[in-house]
Image (tube, rainbow, N blue to C red):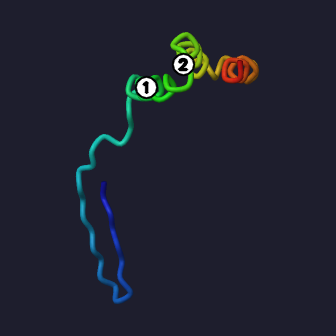
């Protein structure tokens, strides 16, 4: 990441730092969701929610996900 700061007196400060990975992989996010959701839902429902969320762009509406959440 590169940051540049311009002060009122015209001084320009800039610095660059290598940032750690900013984004988690799909697997990281799914594992975290499974861990957290398992406190509330059984494994079958967690699997179904993962399936629905990962295919969200192909769902005609949110009905299937809402039905799974509120069974």
Q: What is the number of callouts on the image?
A: 2
From the viewer's perspective, tell me whether residue 44 is left or right of residue 67: left
**Residue holding disc 1:** 35
Image quarter of residue 53: top right
Q: Earlier in the sequence, mark 1 or mark 2?
A: 1
Q: Residue 58 shows which numbered tag?
A: none
Image quarter of residue 20: top left
**Residue at position x 24%, y 64% in the image:** 15
> Residue 35 in the image: x percent, y percent?
43, 25
Q: Secondary structure at mark 1?
A: helix
From the viewer's perspective, tell me whether residue 64 is left or right of residue 56: right
> Residue 51 in the image: x percent, y percent?
56, 14
User: Label 2: how many residues lie within 10 Å, few (<14), some (14-19) or many (20+)?
Assistant: some
**Residue holding disc 2:** 50
Specify the farthest residue to the bottom.
9
From the viewer's perspective, tell me whether residue 44 is left or right of residue 63: left
Distance Cα–Cα, label 1 vs label 2: 12 Å
User: Label 1: how many residues lie within 10 Å, few (<14), some (14-19) or many (20+)?
Assistant: few
């Amino acid at each position: 990441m590169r940051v540049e700061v311009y002060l009122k007196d015209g001084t320009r400060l800039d610095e660059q730092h290598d940032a750690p990975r900013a984004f988690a992989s799909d697997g990281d996010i799914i594992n975290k969701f499974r861990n957290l959701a398992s406190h509330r839902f059984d494994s079958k429902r967690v699997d179904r929610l993962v399936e629905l969320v990962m295919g969200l762009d192909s769902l005609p509406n949110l009905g299937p996900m809402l039905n799974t959440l509120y069974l």
